Amino acid sequence: QVQLVESGGGLVQAGGSLRLSCAASGSIFNINAMGWYRQAPGKQRELVAIVTSDGSTNYADSVKGRFTISRNNAKNTAYLQMNSLKPEDTAVYYCYLRQGITRQYWGQGTQVTVSS
């Protein structure tokens, strides 16, 4: 089993920045990818950003140029630097980890609220 603990959410004004962290613990091996999804009220969960074991990254079009995902393999931690935040970025952000090909784990979620 893998446990994911997120931190760094909160309330920020539009144009501000936040940094999310996700620390993985437990049976950590063969981590294929780590990333972030988000879910706004009344909407489906969507991919925000993901980084694979070879360092490749993928971002939602809506956050490209504003968000940066990074990963510290030694600490089994992923980060999401969010700049130029907009009210539409308001959502619960979930850390995601893929182990091997099929095993997936989710964090408990952290609220990000951007006021206009």
Image (cartoon, rainbow, N blue to C red):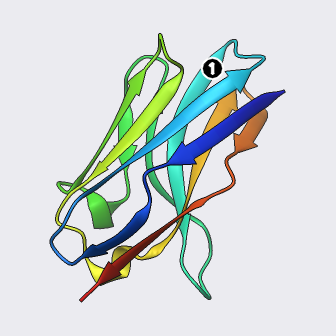
| Vertical side of 83 occupied by 80: above or below | above
Q: Which residue is mark 1?
A: 31
Q: Residues within 10 Å of mark 1 (few under 14, many from 20)?
A: some
The residue sitting at 61% across, 68% down in the picture is 45
Task: Compare residues 22 and 88 and report the one nearer the observer.
Answer: 22
Task: Inspect this view and state whether residue 100 appears.
Answer: no
Residue at coordinates 72% horizontally, 26% vertically from top-left?
A: 101
Residue 109, horizontal then vertical, whole percent: 62, 58
SS at badge 1: strand
Residue at the image point whose x is 40% and y is 26% from the top: 71
Indicate the quadrant where residue 12 lies.
Answer: bottom left
Q: What x and y, as percent, mark residue 6?
A: 56, 46
Judging depth in this view, the residue of 85 and 115 nearest the camera is: 115
Q: Is residue 95 visible?
A: yes
Q: Is residue 6 left or right of residue 19?
A: right
Q: Quadrant of the C terminus?
A: bottom left
- The structure residue drawn at horizontal position 54% and vertical position 56%, both measured from the top left corner, is 37
Q: Quadrant of residue 24?
A: top right
Q: Is residue 113 above or below residue 56?
A: below
- In the image, is residue 57 above or below residue 116? above
Left or right: 29 with respect to 69? right
Which amino acid lies under the numbered mark 1 shown in the image of this protein? Ile
Residue that extends furthest to the right in the rendered view of this protein:
1
Residue 40 location, quadrant: bottom right
Q: Is residue 9 left or right of residue 19?
A: right
Q: Position of residue 103 (x, y in %)?
A: 79, 32
Q: How many marks?
A: 1
Q: Can you say which quadrant of the picture contains the N terminus?
A: top right
Viewer-closest of 98 and 81? 81
| Left or right of 30, for residue 63 | left
From this view, report whether residue 101 is shown above or below residue 47.
above
Question: Residue 86 in the image: x percent, y percent?
Answer: 25, 77
